[in-house]
Amino acid sequence: MANSIMDFIEENYEELLTFAVRINGNWADGEDVLQTVAAKICAMQNELGDLAYAKSYLMTCIRNATFNLKRTRARQRAVDTDFETLKEVIPDEMSNREFALVEWIESLDRHLRFYDEASRKAFIAYYVDQEPLEKAAASLGMTKRQATRKFENMRLYLRRHYKHLFVQLSVLLSM
């Protein structure tokens, strides 16, 4: 017979593990529960002393630890679900900005329809996406100076025909 409860755990480890696995439903949780119980009992060994019914005591501890594990996981799932629901309800500030920017780019593209598509794309890439002038000019097959003049004409067009878009563009350029 075992002298202490820790000796009993060592001698009956396989049997206790089998019980823990059976009650938990899987091997990993069974091992986790048994290790948790063993660690707690090890910390309390002096207080427990020699138990007359060590096997019953340990199986009760394993059962209670299993219930605690299942409750903790259930609470965590509830918190995760609540967070996911909350995430869906509360709009993401960055996605709102990105959506507004996409709307603004589409509006800008629509209002510059007087110009060819390549020029509109280069203009938007330069002013909105902050693409280097060299790259925007290269996409148009122009020099930097020619692209600068082209973009200046496009800005003047916006100023004359769509003042609100020109103001927005000016604010964007000042950032």
Image (cartoon, rainbow, N blue to C red):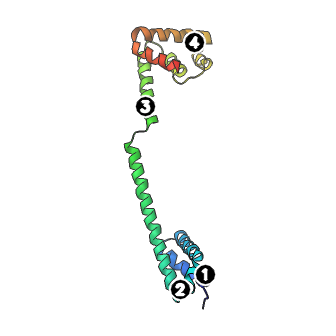
User: What distance separates the C-alpha of mark 4 from that of mark 3?
Assistant: 28 Å
* Left or right: 94, with 34 as reference point: left
User: What distance separates the C-alpha of mark 4 from that of mark 2?
Assistant: 86 Å
Point out residue 15 in the picture as x, y percentages from the top left corner.
55, 82
* Left or right: 1, with 65 as reference point: right
Residue placed under numbered mark 1 in the picture: 6
Residue 95 visible (yes or no): yes
Q: Mark 2 touching mark 1, by CB under 8 A?
A: no
| Mark number, residue 99 | 3
Residue lying at the far bottom in this picture: please name it: 1
What amino acid type should be assigned to the residue bearing mark 3? Phe
For label 2, count other residues whose C-alpha is less than 10 Å away and answer few (under 14), some (14-19) or many (20+).
Answer: some
Q: Mark 3 touching mark 1, by CB under 8 A?
A: no
Q: Is residue 15 above or below residue 145?
A: below
Residue placed under numbered mark 4 in the picture: 147
Say how many tags the image has: 4
Tell me which label, 4 or 1, sits earlier in the chain: 1
Point out residue 125 in the picture as x, y percentages from the top left corner.
53, 22
Quadrant position of the N terminus in the picture: bottom right
